[in-house]
Amino acid sequence: MKLRTRLLLILVGLLAFGLLATDIFTYFQLQSFLVGKVDQELTQASPTMLREVLRAAQGTPNLPNPFGGPGANGASSLQPGSVGELVTTNGEVLGTVHITYGGTNSSIAPNIPKSILKNLGNQTTSTNSFTPSTATNPSTGEYITTGATSGSGNFRVLIVPVGQGLLLVEAFPLNDVYSTLESLRNLEILVSVGVLLVLGLGGYYLVVLGLRPLEKVKHATREIAAGNLEKRVQIDSTKTEIGQLSLDFNEMIDRIEGEFKLRAATEARLRRFVSDASHELRTPLSFLRGHAELFRQGAISTPEELASSMKRIEEQAKRMGRLVDELLLLARFDEGSPVVLVPIDLRLIAHDAAADARAMAPERNVKVNAVEEVFVMAEETGLRQVVGNMVRNAIVHTPPGTSIELEVTKTHEAGLLKVIDFGPGIAPDKAQSIFDRFYRADPSRSRDSGGSGLGLAIVATIIQAYGGTFGVEPTLNNNSEISSASGATFWVSLPLKNS
């Protein structure tokens, strides 16, 4: 069963229960009021009814007339359809009066249980004379509702003891009361059904309107399940529960979409990485296999040729070893292996890297600008490799004799190391890709002279693992000895100790 159907059934059920309770309460309240009014009329008519039944019983022996003669006929003041009887405690009727329209007598009389007559008759046995005044005192009698002795109809009856074991039975018909109650019942049924229909339709509209945001969530869920992760729920208001649900739903899908995009990017990067690694390893392996084939076929016959071949094999083996080491290093950081960061003097690392650069390229002018100690949080081995790769990149990609500067400074929260060269520089459109794995700014450069294309990728990976940032920008040439204004400045920034 749908939620809207359940809500509508609950709404209509509660409304029906409320209307039913109201109808029942109104019905019985009106019934009590109308019957109470009839009781008042019975009390007021008791003296007149007693006079009339005594006239009707004038032939009964030993029955005195307390009213002193026949008197005037007061039947015209009684309610049409009313019945009066003078009975004994045994139920013997001594006199009967029927007040009907047009003066016609009727045989319809109330059916009085004899047990009530006996109980009330016990109050009259000690009285030897008529006391008609008791007929006007309801506390001495009893009100009951009973049916007719024959036919249909109901009466409201007042039974009052009047002395000498006699009882006055006064009965008024309840036809008008029941007719009014029936009209009220029919009206309540009609009004209740109408109210249920109108409010049911209105409630259905309101339920559908209130659940419309859930329909949006449902349709969005189906589209997302079909693969459209860009689908979002339109939020009309965040002040409602459904609005909050829609907001949380959109946030959840945003995170899921982000995770899917991240996974897709990771998978694409992994495929590209495997493809590039395979391509990079294929070259030295093909070279080694080629020299092995030449040796097996006897093409290398002289000691000089053998020594040259072994030298080339050794160079390619070293190159392949470096490539494997770099790939393993990147794989370790990609796995999220924990790193232990300790304070390291960035100035010391810069001086050591400059010394290594002078040994690698003695013709180069390599300077270090570092005035104060700058302790950053890093691993010493990884940080040395980062700076070494940056310096080697500057040596490889600048003409021989080009000067290189290492500058160490710090800001309020970070230590900054720059490797500044004054070579040809890097085109702005290639600066965003320079730190990608196996990327070469100059595709025509050979792998022997240009390296594996992993140096700057290792810089980016290690610096990110240490919580730092990196980048490249054009060199601002303030060196008066160098006329060229071109060049590239690679920089890394790491958090300071206790920052």
Image (tube, grey):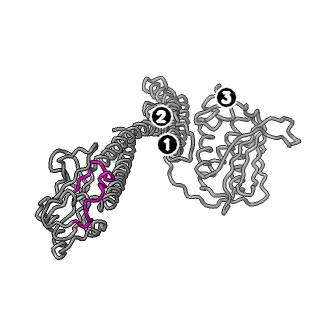
The earlier-in-sequence mark between 1 and 2 is: 2
Q: What residue range appears in magenta?
A: 65-84
Residue toward you, 209 or 290: 209
Does 72 appear in magenta? yes
Quadrant containing the C terminus in the rendered view: bottom right
Q: Earlier in the sequence, mark 1 or mark 3?
A: 1
Q: Is residue 355 visible?
A: yes
Which quarter of the figure has residue 48?
Answer: bottom left
Q: Main secondary structure of the magenta part?
A: loop
Residue 220 tag number: 2
Amino acid type, mark 1: Phe
Residue marked by disc 1: 249
Q: Earlier in the sequence, mark 3 or mark 2?
A: 2
Crowding at mark 1 (Cα within 10 Å: few <14, some 14-19, many 20+) = some
Q: x, y (%) of residue 129? A: 20, 73
Bin the neighbour count of mark 3 within 10 Å (Cα to Cα): few under 14, some 14-19, many 20 and up. Answer: few
Quadrant of residue 74 within the rendered picture: bottom left
Q: Amino acid at mark 2?
A: Ala
Residue 69: x and y in percent read 25, 62
Q: In terms of secondary structure, where does tag 3 sit?
A: loop
Foreground pick, 243 / 466: 243
Residues at marks 1 and 2, CA–CA distance in whole angstroms: 10 Å
The residue wearing badge 3 is 442
Where disc 1 sits, the SS reads helix
Q: Is residue 314 visible?
A: no
Q: Position of residue 433 (x, y in %)?
A: 64, 34
